[in-house]
Image: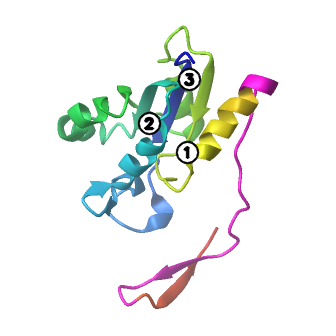
Amino acid sequence: MKADVSVIIPAAGLSLRMGTDVRKPFIMIGEKPVFFYTLEKFYKLKRVKEIIFVVNKKDLSTVIEKWSNELKAYKVTKIIAGGKRRQDSVYKGLSQLDSDTRIVLIHDAVRPLVKSREIEEVIEKTDQKGAAILASPMKLTVKKVNSNLEIIKTVPR
């Protein structure tokens, strides 16, 4: 099957609700930032030909300096600055797609728990129906814990 899927990975948000100095995409899990775990789910898929990584403009030079070589191995063909809102960042990503792209997937950089099989099913459904979405039930309550894993507050949603 021909590689005809482009992926836009928005990572330009401010992560204001997190209450930390580090934006969510750059939180380390083990020895790498969380966004690498998300990219792993997409770059291994045969039909994915390119990934557009959209980051906050404040992070652009750091991402390019620290990770551009490694990101190439993950099929990241472009690293670009996002916009003020998520839809602006997605629009900027759309403007960078290869002209022969048939299917576009959009997936947040900080959602690494998606399964490769789920992504493949979205691609299959898009082939059949023209469009598809993957969704899961929202968690109604989010709790913040301290280093001892004790609940210290409920995060407003």
Which of the two discs, 3 and 2, labels the residue nearer the N terminus? 3
Tell me: residue 47, above or below residue 18: above
Q: Quadrant of residue 66?
A: top left
> Residue at label 2?
44
Identity of the residue drawn at 24% across and 33% down = 68
Of the two numbered discs 3 and 2 in the rendering, the one whose residue sits closer to the viewer: 2
Inter-mark Cα distance, 1 to 2? 8 Å
Q: Nearer the viewer, residue 132 or 91?
A: 132
Mark 1 in CB contact with mark 2 (< 8 angstroms): yes
Residue 5 location, x and y as percent?
A: 56, 23
Residue 44 forms part of the magenta stretch: no
Inter-mark Cα distance, 1 to 3? 14 Å
Which of the two discs, 1 and 2, labels the residue nearer the N terminus? 2
Q: Nearer the viewer, residue 139 or 128?
A: 128
**Please, what is the dominant secondary structure of the magenta stretch?**
loop
> Residue at label 3?
5
Identity of the residue drawn at 66% across and 31% down = 123
Residue 131 location, x and y as percent?
A: 75, 28
Kindly identify the amino acid type of the residue bearing the numbered disc 3: Val
Mark 3 in CB contact with mark 2 (< 8 angstroms): no
Residue 152 location, x and y as percent?
A: 49, 88
Which of the two discs, 1 and 3, labels the residue nearer the N terminus? 3
Kindly identify the amino acid type of the residue bearing the numbered disc 2: Lys
Identity of the residue drawn at 55% across and 31% down = 90
